[in-house]
Amino acid sequence: MASSGGRGADAAREIYVDGLQTAVEHFSTRADPPKRLVYTSSTGVYGDHGGGWVDEDTPTEPTTEKTRVLKDAEEVALDSPITGTVVRFAGLYGSDRYRLERYLDGPVTEGYLNMIHREDAAGVVRFLLEENLARGEVVLAVDDEPVDKWGFADWLAAQCGVPEPPKQTKDERLSEQSLSESARRRILTSKRCSNEKLHELGYEFSFPTYKEGYREAIKAYPSR
């Protein structure tokens, strides 16, 4: 679960690919090597699917150098002499990571949100390890309800008792000169991620959708 700290593709390759390879080489040669390796990847490896559904069998089409690095790291994990599992996480949220202002103040860009509460993110890793599941496989970690960003923002505004935020089309957002590569990638890669496999494996969500997951933040919002 190492992080490149939000830096560029070179730093990402150093941490995600080279660092993972170093860890694998070190731990696999121990007298008592680990039995399992779980690598935490991202749904960013899918690229754009025009709002369509993706799952573990959908071909990956990384659109940036950083997401290509993530895909390369997945191969390191799956080719490891330690039995590897790749978990592709959707956007994490939860305590200290709700980002209410982004959706309440706007403008909100069109597209889909794929999310998972941070407690379920940790829960998925623990579940796969304790139950010894998905050996040598990929698993998508996302909640039950991918949601349209505009619809989510309007729902959140209603729950918090504030006006609906202004909206922005993709073209309007992409015309801004100050966009980072990661922001541009998020705008251009619309998809809905399926968690059917995770349900089939038997994982039970603490927060099945954003409606349960954002309850804490909504209760604490000042206007309430």
Image (spheres, rainbow, N blue to C red):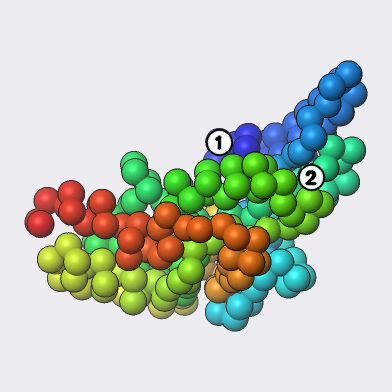
Q: Is residue 211 left or right of residue 162?
A: right
- Residue shown at 30%/69% (left/top)? 153
Residue for badge 2: 84
Across and down, in percent, residue 221 comes to 17, 52
- Which residue is at 45% across, 71% downward? 145
Kind of element beneath mark 2: strand
Q: Amino acid type of disc 2?
A: Gly
Query: The N terminus lies in which quarter of the figure?
Result: top right
- Residue 181 spot, x, y in % from top left: 57, 55
- Marker count (numbered): 2
Q: Position of residue 190 (x, y in %)?
A: 55, 73
- Label 2 Cα neighbours within 10 Å, binned few <14 / some 14-19 / many ≥20: many
Mark nearest the camera among 1 and 2 is 2
**Can you say whether 146 is above or below 15 in the image?**
below
Q: Is 47 placed above or below 213 here?
A: below
Residue 69 percent across, percent down from the top left: 74, 49
Q: Helix or strand or loop: what does disc 1 sit on? A: loop
Marks 1 and 2, Cα distance to the nearest angstrom? 24 Å
Q: Residues within 10 Å of mark 1 (few under 14, many from 20)?
A: few
> Disc 1 or 2, which lies upstream in sequence?
1
Q: Residue at x 55, y 36 (%)?
A: 5
Q: Is residue 106 visible?
A: no
Mark 1 — residue? 5
Q: Which mark is residue 139?
A: none
Amino acid of disc 1: Gly
Residue 196 or residue 87, whichever sits in front:
196
